[in-house]
Image (cartoon, helix red, strand yellow):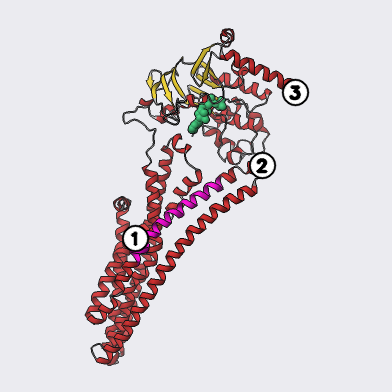
C-alpha cells in the first residue's frame, strides 16, 4: 500500500524536495538551540562579556529568522503538496466513477459513493504532507537529540530514553485500532449521507405519506451509530494521550531529580543541565506527535484504503483493447441468440433473435416485467449480454468503443433525468458545443418553443433539481429536444409520451414521427394505440419473443398481441365509462 501511496508523489518531486529539505533544515536548527543555550550559560554567562553576549543574541536572532522562513515554506509548500495529491486522488476517483457500469450503480447507494470522493479523502492531503516529513524528522530529532544528550551526560540520557519503549507500546496498541475505527467511521458517514440523500430526494414521498416520524427514527439510528463509533475513537485517543502524557512527565521528573543529583555531585554543569532539559523538550517533540500518529494517520490510511477499494473495482463493461470508433451508422440491428440476466443464474431474456432493418420503426410490447426495457438497454451496452451477440451494421457492439456507439443512440427514458441548470444547458447536453440556433431549433421541433417564449428568462430559465419546476410533459419535451439536438441514427423511446396529455401527445407524436424519419427507432410502448403504425410490433414475453408483425396481421393471427390489445381496449372502455 505504501508503494502505491508514494507513487502519487512522483509528479510533485520538486515540491516534495523543497518541502522536505526545509523541514529537515528547520529540524536541525531546532536541535542546535539547546546546545547554544548550554554554551551560553556555561561560557558566556560567567564571563559577562556584553559585546559577545549581544553578538550571540544577534546570531540567534538571525537563526530564528531563518527558521521562521523555513517553517513558513514548509507550511505552505508542504500543504500545497498535500492538496495536490488529494486533488489528484479525487480526480481519479471521479474519473473511475464515470467508467463504472449500470450493474455497479444498481448495487450502490449514492451517499456512500459521495463520501468516498469527499470525506474519505479529506485527511489524505494532511497525511501526504506530514507523513514522510514527520517520520523522517521524528527519527532525526530522536537520534540527534539522543546523541547530543549522550554527549552531555550518559546516565541522564539513558534515563530519558526510558520513554521510548512506552511510546512504541502506545503506537503498537492504539494505532491499528484507530485505523479500523476510522474505516468504520467513514462507513457510518456514508450510511447517513445515503440516508440523507434519499430523504431529501424523496421528501415529496415522505411528506405525502406523512412518514416523517419513521424517517426521523431511521436517521436517528444512523446518527447514533456514528456517535458510538466516534466515542470509541475518543476513548482510544483519551487512553493513548493520557498514557503518553503521564509517561513523559514521569520520565521528566526522573530527569529533574537525577539531573539535580548529578549537578550537586559535580558531574554535570548548570549550563549542561539547562541544555539537557531543553534537549529533553526536543527529544519529546516527536512523542507529542503521537497524538497525530494516533489520530490523523489512521484517518488518512483508512481513507486511502477505501479509495483504493473504489479504484480496484474493475468496470465490467469497457472498451476492448482493439475496439474501434464506430463509423457513421445506418442503424441495421441484429440480436443473435441473445441471453441476459441481472443475476447469472436467473435469465430474463433468452434465445432472442431479431433482425431490424435500418430506418425501421419497431415497437416492443408485452406484459410488465417481461424484459422490454432490459432488451433495449443491451443495445447501448449498459449491460453486457451473457450469450449471443448484438450487431449494428454487421459489427459486433463489443468491437466498437462505448463512446462512439452511445453517441449514435438517442434514448428518451420513461423517467426523465434533467440537470439542475437552465433549459438551454439541458438541451445543449444532447450535443455539447451546439450553437444557439441549433438549440432553438431543437426546442422548436420538440414543441417547447411556445413555453419558452412565455417564460421571462426564456431558455435561461432555471428548472430546479431534476427539473422539479417543470411539468411532466415539459420534462419529456425537454428530453426529446435533447435528442433532436443529438440527432442519432438510432432511437430508443421508452414510453416516451406516457406523461403527456392527449393534445400534447399528438404534437409530440408528430415530432417523434418526424425524428424517426430515416432512423432506426425502437419504441417500448404500453399504450398500443401509439404504436399501431409501427413498421413492426414485437411481442416480448418471459418465454422470449412470442410473435412479431404489423398490427393488422397480429390482430388477425389472434395470438398474445390480440389478447393484449383486447384487454387494453376493455380497460380503456371501462375508464371511459367511469369518466362519464
Ligand atoms: N437493474 C436491475 N437489476 C435487477 N433486476 C432488474 C433490473 N431492472 C429490471 N430488473 C428485473 O428484470 C425484469 C425485466 O424488467 P424490465 O424493466 O426489462 O421489464 P419491462 O418489460 O420493461 O417492464 P415494464 O413494462 O413494467 O417497464 C423484471 O423482473 C425486473 O424486476
Most foreground residue, 475 or 530: 530
Q: Is residue 130 magenta?
A: no
Mark 3–mark 2 distance (CA, rounded to whole Å): 27 Å
Residue 379 in which image quadrant? top left
Residue 303 image position (x, y, % from top left)? 40, 53
Given the current orientation, which residue lies at the most extreme front position? 345
Given the current orientation, which residue lies at the most extreme right position? 580
Up-down: is 38 above or below 63? below
Residue 32 image position (x, y, % from top left)? 28, 76
- Is the shortest distance between ligand 1 and the CB of mark 3 under 8 Å? no
Up-down: is 49 above or below 116? below
Q: Are marks 3 and 2 in contact (CB under 8 Å)?
A: no
Which one is earlier in the sequence, the residue at label 2 or at label 1?
1
Residue 515 image position (x, y, % from top left)? 55, 21
Per the rendered image, the range of residues in magenta is 170-197
Mark 1–mark 3 distance (CA, rounded to whole Å): 73 Å
Rendered image: mark on residue 131 = 1
- Report if residue 290 is visible in the image: yes
Read off the residue under disc 2.
Answer: 209
> Secondary structure beneath disc 3?
helix
Read off the residue under disc 3.
Answer: 578
Q: Is residue 173 magenta?
A: yes
Q: Is residue 576 left or right of residue 415?
A: right
Most foreground residue, 149 or 107: 107
Amino acid at each position: 500500500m505504501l508503494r502505491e501511496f508514494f507513487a502519487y508523489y512522483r509528479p510533485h518531486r520538486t515540491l516534495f524536495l523543497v518541502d522536505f529539505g526545509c523541514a529537515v533544515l528547520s529540524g536541525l536548527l531546532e536541535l542546535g538551540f539547546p546546545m547554544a543555550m548550554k554554551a551560553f550559560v556555561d561560557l558566556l554567562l560567567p564571563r559577562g562579556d556584553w559585546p559577545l553576549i549581544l553578538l550571540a543574541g544577534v546570531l540567534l536572532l538571525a537563526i530564528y529568522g531563518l527558521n521562521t522562513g523555513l517553517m513558513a515554506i514548509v507550511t505552505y509548500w508542504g500543504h500545497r503538496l498535500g492538496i495536490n495529491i488529494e486533488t489528484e486522488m479525487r480526480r481519479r476517483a471521479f474519473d473511475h466513477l464515470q467508467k463504472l457500469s449500470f450493474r455497479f450503480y444498481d448495487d450502490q447507494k449514492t451517499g456512500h459513493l459521495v463520501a468516498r470522493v469527499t470525506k474519505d479523502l479529506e485527511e489524505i492531503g494532511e497525511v501526504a504532507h506530514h507523513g514522510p516529513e514527520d517520520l523522517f524528522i521524528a527519527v532525526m530529532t530522536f537520534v540527534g537529540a539522543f546523541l547530543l544528550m549522550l554527549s552531555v551526560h550518559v546516565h541522564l540520557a539513558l534515563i530519558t530514553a526510558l520513554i521510548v519503549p512506552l511510546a512504541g507500546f502506545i503506537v503498537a496498541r492504539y494505532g491499528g485500532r484507530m485505523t479500523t475505527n476510522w474505516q468504520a467511521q467513514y462507513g457510518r458517514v456514508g450510511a447517513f449521507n445515503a440516508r440523507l440523500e434519499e430523504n431529501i430526494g424523496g421528501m415529496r414521498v415522505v411528506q405525502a405519506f406523512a412518514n416523517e416520524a419513521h424517517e426521523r427514527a431511521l436517521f436517528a439510528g444512523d446518527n447514533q451509530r456514528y456517535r458510538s463509533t466516534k466515542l470509541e475513537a475518543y476513548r482510544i485517543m483519551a487512553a493513548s494521550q493520557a498514557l503518553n502524557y503521564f509517561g513523559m512527565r514521569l520520565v521528566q521528573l526522573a530527569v529533574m531529580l537525577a539531573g539535580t543529583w548529578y549537578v550537586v555531585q559535580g558531574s554535570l554543569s548548570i549550563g549542561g543541565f539547562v541544555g539537557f532539559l531543553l534537549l529533553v523538550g526536543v527529544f519529546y517533540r516527536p512523542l507529542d506527535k503521537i497524538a497525530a500518529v494516533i489520530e490523523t494517520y489512521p484517518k488518512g490510511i483508512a481513507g486511502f484504503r477505501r479509495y483504493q477499494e473504489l479504484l480496484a473495482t474493475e468496470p465490467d463493461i469497457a472498451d476492448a483493447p482493439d475496439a474501434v470508433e464506430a463509423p457513421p451508422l445506418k442503424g441495421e440491428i441484429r440480436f443473435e441468440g441473445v441471453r441476459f440476466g441481472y443475476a447469472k443464474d436467473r435469465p430474463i431474456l433468452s434465445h432472442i433473435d431479431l433482425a431490424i432493418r435500418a430506418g425501421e420503426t419497431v415497437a416492443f410490447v408485452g406484459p410488465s416485467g417481461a424484459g422490454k426495457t432490459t432488451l433495449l438497454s443491451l443495445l447501448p451496452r449498459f449491460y453486457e449480454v451473457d450469450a449471443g451477440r448484438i450487431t449494428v451494421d454487421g459489427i459486433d457492439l463489443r468491437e466498437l468503443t462505448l463512446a462512439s456507439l452511445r453517441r449514435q443512440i438517442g434514448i428518451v427514458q420513461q423517467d426523465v433525468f434533467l440537470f439542475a441548470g437552465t433549459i438551454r444547458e439541458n438541451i445543449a447536453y444532447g450535443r455539447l458545443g451546439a450553437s444557439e440556433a441549433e438549440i432553438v431549433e431543437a426546442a422548436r421541433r420538440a414543441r417547447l418553443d411556445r413555453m419558452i417564449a412565455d417564460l421571462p428568462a426564456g431558455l435561461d430559465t432555471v428548472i430546479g433539481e431534476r427539473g422539479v419546476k417543470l411539468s411532466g410533459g415539459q420534462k419529456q419535451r425537454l428530453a426529446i429536444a435533447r435528442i433532436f439536438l443529438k440527432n442519432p441514427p438510432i432511437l430508443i423511446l421508452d414510453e416516451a409520451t406516457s406523461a403527456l396529455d392527449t393534445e400534447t401527445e399528438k404534437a409530440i407524436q408528430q415530432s417523434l414521427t418526424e425524428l424517426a424519419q430515416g432512423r432506426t427507432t425502437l419504441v417500448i410502448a404500453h399504450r398500443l394505440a401509439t404504436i399501431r403504425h409501427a413498421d413492426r410490433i414485437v411481442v416480448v414475453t418471459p418465454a422470449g419473443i412470442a410473435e412479431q408483425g404489423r398490427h393488422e396481421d397480429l390482430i388477425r393471427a389472434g395470438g398474445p398481441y390480440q389478447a393484449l390489445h383486447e384487454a387494453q381496449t376493455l380497460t380503456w372502455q371501462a375508464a371511459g365509462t367511469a369518466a362519464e
